[in-house]
Amino acid sequence: MGRTVVAGNWKMNHGPRDAEAFARALRLPHNPELEVILFPPALSLSALEQALAERDFSVSLRLGVQNIHWEESGAFTGEQSAPMVAQTGATHVLVGHSERRQIFGETDDDTRRKLAVAAAVGLIPVLCVGETLEEREGGRLEEVLRRQVEGALDSASTREALSENGGFLLAYEPVWAIGTGETATPDDASHAHGLLRKMLQDRLGSDSVDPRRVPILYGGSVKPGNAAELLEGADVDGVLVGGASLEPDSFQRIAEAAG
Ligand code: PGA
């Protein structure tokens, strides 16, 4: 896989003014093989997009949102839909992030429906999967990842829409490593990524997105100090960074580690 993806998930941080300040301060390496994707809060997307447009980066820089509803429109106060997001500058969307699953009770079925609606409007989803500590210690890593990947990609029409619209990304985010300071070892990450690549091969088959071309990102307490080592792992095509993506300087250092 050629490109390395460095994605930043700001979660519920950085309003429009903070996003502008981030864009002004951001420095990124000259690396044609690097793809950077930022996931600000939806409220800050337009301010970030405009402020970034005034900068001149030599890397591919994309924007995404952190969540969508599974319906295209309707009486769902406080929610945002995939067709609405498609009218903005966002090209990507996180689907099934563990905080959505754990805190907001999203199920595998919700994730499946969100992936479907994202694919239908041409957004590129980043499907997030990962096991809890209890599941890991119970020896259920493979079973949990398989359930999450196969459940999300269950529908042939979703798989078709994804292949037509530029594919998707997978993010392996062990729940016990998110925001905890605990990081999977490079070997843990490579092992899980190898399992995921195999699952993609089993699930996608030959008529769909080429499973070898689906970038698999690692997420969970990625920092400037551990990013290079994690990125060296087999089948680790990039990183999804939470806390350490909030400061331009630490995000820049992670992007440099990808080079
Ligand atoms: P973290 O979050 O880097 O703060 O652990 C990662 C994520 O949730 O995507």
Image: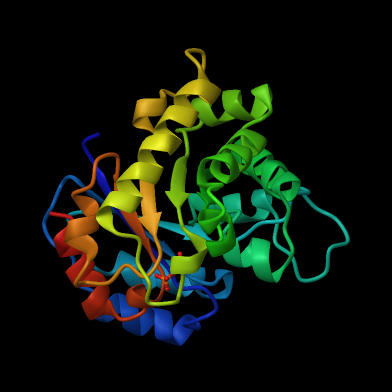
Determine the residue positioned at 66% across, 22% down: 156
Q: Position of residue 82 (x, y in %)?
A: 66, 50
Q: State which quarter of the image contains the C terminus.
A: bottom left
On the rendered structure, is 22 left or right of 74?
left
Give the answer, above or below, for where 22 lies relative to 200: below
Determine the residue positioned at 85% across, 56% down: 74
Q: Position of residue 1 (x, y in %)?
A: 25, 34
Q: Is residue 66 visible?
A: no
On the rendered structure, is 228 left or right of 110?
left
Q: Determine the residue located farthest toward the front in the rendered image.
A: 138
Determine the residue positioned at 47% across, 82% down: 14
Q: Position of residue 192 (x, y in %)?
A: 40, 44
Q: Nearer the viewer, residue 110 or 15?
A: 110
Q: Position of residue 15 (x, y in %)?
A: 50, 83
- The image quadrant of residue 58 is bottom left
Q: Is residue 184 visible?
A: yes
Q: Nearer the viewer, residue 109 or 132?
A: 132
Give the answer, above or below, for where 21 lies relative to 136: below
